[in-house]
Image: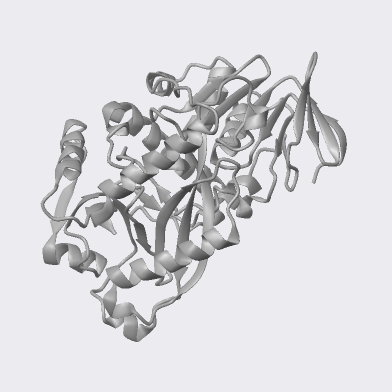
Amino acid sequence: MLRGQIAADWLIVGAGFAGVAFARRLSEINPDLKIIIVDAYSPRESASARNSGFVIGLPHNIGSSTAELKKANAYRHLLQEGIRQLEQVMAQHGITCDWEKVGKYHCQAERGNDRILQEYARQLDSMEEPWTLAEGDALYQKLGTRFYHKGIYTPGCVLVNPAQLIAGLNHCLPENVQRYDNTPVLGVRYGSVAEVLTPYGVIRTPRIMLATNALSPELRPGLSRQAAMATFASLTDPLTDAQLASLPPMQSWGLTPVNAIAGATFRFTPDRRFLIRQHVIPALKGQVSAAQTWQATQLHQQLFHKVYPTLREVSISQTWSGTLSVTRNGAPEWGELNRFICTAGGCNGAGVSKQTVAGSLLADFMLKQDNPHLADMLSLGKASFMPPSPALDIGIALSLQKERYLGRKEV
């Protein structure tokens, strides 16, 4: 926790994937910079630690739209660069985090409506990316369930323990980077430099990088361009030997649904558990109640029994929530906001690889370094304006209702 008054060349608010990537790249460019990172929690408590552990290497549709696929090549280059950067840091510092390059399945449960999978296959072909179609018994042998009608397997996805990964990345930051946990930012006073107020201290700095996605909107000047959503995930108890023997022989695998709002993300983990991520709600103030988490637990247990009816005795051991940031048009909120503040936000899901590269490229952008991936980042465009509440609340509720209706056959 930060106490007293301190000065820095750069202050980074948020120690998630974007924040630590930005700090690392700043230090590589200029090791003499004094860089401070503050976070309201610790790395293992952050939203980065609470994601589902998919390090995505290819664009995929969000909900029933194909927004990312329209800029597929730019997203692909960026996501794969994010994976490369993470692999480089892990190898350099020996970070252990159950990193497994096992690919993923993009699956649908509904029969007869293959529009989204067909569009996904066309885009993969256009990028000359390898993929295979699995259905029927072949898909059952991989996933141990007949709930899904068919799926497209792509080999480039990595599965990881996200809490171990983000903790490791924070632990091995360069020497000129200081990190203060349990230090929320309460406000910013602007003058010749910015004075960033925390509960027990003040940081004076000419430059601030916001790595809080849609959280802390009061720190962002100008119009709102992203909103916070909460999603929930659960882990089951580990399967017993007898329960495991009732399924086909399975290695670790990950599955994303054709409709990310209504459908469920599943993983089978190295320690013989199932992870279920399903249920998305607005969280415009970043707050989730215990009652909402309890409701998600019940939904996940019902869904798990529906997908794996032979494992009805398997119980959920823990459920948690995490926030992500969404924009109206799928573009990120990325770049300079004013002479004090820049940001890398609007992740729209798939945040591990996407926010890693967004953070590192923002450092290149702000320090005017040449990087061929900057063209890809800039080609994604800018996040469009979002109306204030209550219009925003109504718009989000209607959008979620639409996606749940369109994806009603996926759960």
Pick out the residue farthest to the bottom: 242
Asked whether 184 or 225 is in front, the reply is 225
- The answer to whether residue 95 is visible is no
- The answer to whether residue 321 is visible is yes
Q: Report the residue at 60% width, 52% height from top.
A: 167
Residue 62 x %, y %: 33, 40
Residue 268 x %, y %: 36, 65
Residue 254 x %, y %: 33, 57
Q: Report the residue at 74% width, 24% height from top.
A: 9
Q: Report the residue at 59% width, 45% height from top.
A: 286
On the rendered structure, is 344 left or right of 76?
right
What colour scheme was applied to this rendering of the protein?
one colour
On the rendered structure, is 147 left or right of 341?
left
User: Eyeballing the image, is 151 above or below 362?
Assistant: below
Residue 359 x %, y %: 53, 31
Asked whether 204 or 83 is in front, the reply is 204
Q: Quadrant of the C terminus?
A: bottom left
On the rendered structure, is 262 left or right of 238?
left
**Residue 136 location, quadrant:** bottom left
Disc count in the image?
A: 0
